[in-house]
Amino acid sequence: MAAPSTTVDVVAPRSSGSDNYLTHDKGVLSWIFTLDHKRIGVMYLCSVLTAFALGGFFALLVRTELLTPQRTIMDHDTYNQMFTLHGAIMVFLVIIPGIPAALGNIIMPLQLGAKDVAFPRLNLASYHLWIVGALFMLSSLAINAVDTGWTFYTPYSTTTSTAVVPAAFGAFILGFSSIFTGLNFIVTMHKLRPPGMTWFRLPLFCWALYSTALIQVLATPVIGITLLMMIVERTLHIGIFDPMLGGDPVLFQHFFWFYSHPAVYIMIVPAFGVIGEIIPVFSRKRIFGYKFIAVSSLAIAFLGFLVWGHHMFVSGQSVLAGTIFSAITFLIAIPTAIKVFNWITTMYKGVIHLDTPMLYALAFLWVFTIGGLTGIFLAVMSVDVHLHDTYFVVAHFHYVMMGGAITAFMGGLHYWWPKFTGKMYEEKVGRVGAALVFVGLNVTFFPQFILGSRGMPRRYYNYLPEFQPLHVLSTLGAYTLGIGFLLTAFYLYKSLKSGKTAPMNPWGGATLEWHCSSPPPYYNFHKPPVVTAGPYDGYENLMYDETISGYVPRKEKIV
Amino acid sequence: MSASITNSVASFSGLFGLEPKLPKLAPSPYFWMPPSASVTTENTDALYNFMLWMSLFFSVAIFWAMVRFCVKYRAKSRAANEIAAKTSQHNTMLELTWSVIPLFVVVPLFVGGFKGFVNLRTPPKAAMEIRATGQKWKWLFTYDGLGTPDDALHVPVNTAVRMIINSVDVIHSLYIPSFRTKMDAVPGRYTDLWFKATQTGEFPIFCAEYCGTSHSDMLSRVVVHPPGGYEKWLAATIAQADSLTGKDRGAMLYEKQGCSTCHSIDGTPKVGPSWKAIYGKMESMTGGPAMKVDENYLRESMLDPQAHIVMGYAPAMPTFEGKLSDKDIDGLIDFIKSLK
């Protein structure tokens, strides 16, 4: 199809710094009680980054303890609390809200061409609930930090003396926060698309958030009720999961993974969305196989509901159940592989710019491929019997969660940073940061595949001395990661203070957020844009203007 | 006095081949996997190796394409304003092809994994049975109802063994890497696994399901005896264990029943109070009046451990009801009394 000459018939005025969402209102209260999706997104972002720093700090403590086979810096119980807090914070406070609630809130309505999300008050409530949930979770730290692992398996969680109830109740509240965001995004994408924005003109980031939102709304209630039942059992001794009280501990695992496997896709599908934005823009080329990528997100969301039992091959679950779960798990490999092939093909004969966001996207492709392929090992039932609950699993999910979700989050953060802050960061330092993160995460997690295959169980404080060299290597990788993230925090902070003013469209993106000024005006669009082309059309009609270091529409159109 | 007791514990440790607290990881002929020592490992290792090569192939191919495209199609500069070549935006045949290729790869993997799994889950009818009970933080092995004479698992070579597994407190998981098998120990139900050792020697046993403070110390070994060796070991051990009485029996049980995981005999507080000089002491209790640690308190603590908890300790101990005979309990009490 011939690309029409423009994507929208209205171009917002170039940023003059006079009125944007950051300067529209003043004062702390104007932030705390704002209904603006961008401000809520920025508050989410700051909170998530704070939680990320805390979770990362705990990770470094855990890795430091593992430098030696015996005690290094802390005792058994402290270690168990540290890895529990690391896991719970990273899952519930960082990765689940990271891309949808922080970046999604800021960008999705802009990309869609809407003034805000459908329910701005619900959006604010979601953020406030996040804060309350986070406080509950962290209060466990102050009382007697929870030591159950982020999985809260019964009957350990109903009998341990640590503060399980506040942590679990925190996760319960965070679940509501996540449901509110999901519900809001679904309605927004159904009802607030401007004229011409058909479903197949939605940017892939929106498609990914839509698929994610479906999972958030359908799966999260299950973890909520499960954690409540666990709390009820712990406090009122009503037998649900504890065999001493007549319950069934494996039932908890079914309930838990019924949410927590789909939750893996809550974490990774938005990452797919970010990568789907970055690769075409930095290859100056329309995405390859748009519809396949868009629909594969939905397929993954759907299939993700039917595989929870693959976490339970050695739990005593029946062979038949295991077989069905294993078979469906393999099916997920297919939409996932489609995405990777499509992203790579998009780069073919492109004009590739290796700026920081693209470096993160490339890192994602490589790391996510390894994460995905090692997932196949774990889907093969007989091999999983050996690898289950070893460091192989730890390495696999860190390659997907840290290497996949966090890398994509970092890519998205750098990609949209100029848009929502109005500032450019130091590009060269950004590339060094991306390289450090890439090297660090491979050095940290690759040795863990070897450790796990050799039989090193996870959540071990002491370990056999034979495993030490690989643990030391892994810890050195973790320190590299730490340095990479510190550097990133430093230059991003510096860009806020003294960064160059960002142009409207620094990377030459064609989606609607790049038609707003940087930072965007309070109401996003002065009048609703009319969309006449797809989200990745018309790169040839944008021209780089060196005087503003950004892209502007080309004078003579190329068809 | 206490030195001689420590010695007597050490000598029993010697008797049962216990000195090294940690199981030894035998050197492996493979880079990725531990040594293979059971008939059930073949399927697992073959599939694992296949996937390793497959992963290597795909990750190298993807990496190669990525790097090649980045080098070949790298933009000169933003200012050059190059325009990407027009290539097709999608190609249904190509996309169907690369959707179907992964399917062809994963179907045989699924079938192979299924066959191996069914084999792992189906013990031969004639298998000898050994019970494994998980408790915080020790595996107890019972042979034909003959008590738990040793904290290592002893099996004969080339014999199918079915382990019947349960737990008395939280979920544990019996994991023998060299046999490529593991199974959760779930309180309130029995699970099982089987293996047929193909090599004599010792291989580590781990607890693979997180179970609290000393999860990572819940280690044991499987000792695979040459033909005839297992029967000899069983007879000798049982005879030896039965002949012990009084504090010697207590010292033996202190190691074998896992008491030593949580109770020291040198005064160091661990998960539970140290046994050194505890007999006759007045101890404050959580939520109740202070109690004197006498014979009755010690007996109650073994059979109903949650009844009275010494202040400052977690209610973590499982009951030993049914696992300790009166003779065993008397022995343990004598042993505790001797720790002055």
Image (tube, coloured by chain):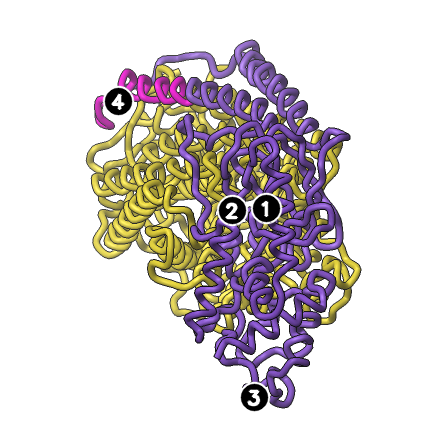
Chain colours: A yellow, B purple
Q: Is residue A484 above or below residue A229?
A: above
Is residue A412 depicted above or below B243 in this figure? Answer: above
Q: Chain of mark 3?
A: B
Q: CA distance from mark 2 to mark 4?
A: 31 Å
Nearer the camera: disc 2 or disc 3: 3
Between A15 and A303, the one lying in front of the other is A303
Q: Work out how far the residue at label 2 is from the one at label 3, CA to CA, in angstroms.
A: 59 Å
Answer with left or right where residue A262 lies relative to residue A248: left
Residue that numbered label 3 is attached to: B282
Does label 2 or label 1 sit earlier along the sequence? 2
Which residue extends farthest top? B93
User: Rounded to the nearest whole Å, what is the CA distance between mark 4 and mark 3?
Assistant: 81 Å
Instruction: State the image quarter where residue B118 is shown.
Output: top right
Chain letter belonging to callout 1:
A
Image coords of residue B244 (percent x, y): 61, 62
Quadrant of image for the C terminus of chain A:
top left
Q: Which residue is mark 4?
A: B75
Q: Report the magenta residues as a range.
A: B59-80
Report which residue position mark 1 lands on.
A185
Q: Position of residue A229 (x, y in %)?
A: 72, 61
Is disc 2 in the same subunit as disc 1?
yes
Q: Is residue A263 visible?
A: yes
B177 is higher (above) or lower (below) than B76: below
- Name the residue beneath numbered marker 2: A100
Kindly report which numbered mark, 4 or 3, lies closer to the viewer in this rendering: 3
Density class for disc 1 (Cα within 10 Å; few <14, some 14-19, many ≥20) is many
